[in-house]
Image (cartoon, rainbow, N blue to C red):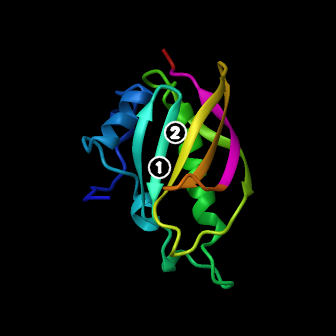
Amino acid sequence: MGEHKYGVVTPGILKSYDGLGFLQAIVDGTLPQPPIGETLGFHLVEAEPGRAVFAGTPEFRHYNPIGTVHGGFAATLLDSALACAIATTMKKGDVWTTLELKLNYVRAMTTETGVVRAEGRVIHRGRSVATSEGDIKDAAGRLYAHATTTCMIFPAKD
């Protein structure tokens, strides 16, 4: 997935972007990828209005005691993709946070799975609450998990 820089921007930098511009700056390398991506080995790879995609490769370091990738890997990918899909709708200065994440696991991931993509898509964007849905699929299009989320939106203070 290439070389990435990791970090967290200051609140001032965050608030200087609208949501889509912020995420596109991460994708193009202008701004750093979040540190959780370095920890778990996934990255934001696409952002467009109402949609965000993260990609990662399940590895042995992600295994649980029963010999498959821990469900937290999928949950973190989906939480990121679904919340960032909603983030694409944010105006400058708006902030958001996940209120609820509902996840269904369909099949186990292993080191044989290869690269997976978690795609989030906005379902509804209200003034203070938004919802999105998404899934994780491998390169062949096989479904591994799907989810929905609800995010709280805090509009910018004028």
Residue at (57% x, 74% y) in the render: 110
The quadrant where residue 5 appears: bottom left
The CA distance from mark 1 to mark 2 is 9 Å
- Circles 1, 2 touching at the beta carbon (< 8 Å): yes
Q: Is residue 139 magenta?
A: no
Q: Main secondary structure of the magenta part?
A: strand
Tag of residue 84: 2
The quadrant where residue 37 appears: bottom left
Viewed as shown, does residue 94 lie left or right of 66?
Answer: left
Amino acid on which disc 2 is placed: Cys
Amino acid on which disc 1 is placed: Phe
Q: Is residue 35 above or below residue 14?
A: below
Residue at (50% x, 25% y) in the render: 90
Tag of residue 54: 1
- Could you say which is closer to the camera, residue 68 or residue 36? 68
Q: Residues within 10 Å of mark 1 (few under 14, many from 20)?
A: many
Viewed as shown, does residue 156 lie left or right of 78?
Answer: left
Q: Quadrant of the N terminus?
A: bottom left
Q: Residue furthest front?
A: 140
Magenta residues (range)? 145-156
Task: Residue 7: give x, y in percent of width and height.
Answer: 34, 54
Q: Residues within 10 Å of mark 2 (few under 14, many from 20)?
A: many
**SS at badge 2:** helix
- Could you say which is closer to the camera, residue 45 or residue 84? 45
**SS at badge 1:** strand
Task: Residue 68: give x, y in percent of width and height.
Answer: 63, 77
Q: Earlier in the sequence, mark 1 or mark 2?
A: 1
Viewed as shown, does residue 138 lie left or right of 20?
Answer: right
- Could you say which is closer to the camera, residue 67 or residue 30? 67
Residue at (32% x, 56% y) in the render: 6
- Could you say which is closer to the camera, residue 97 or residue 73? 73
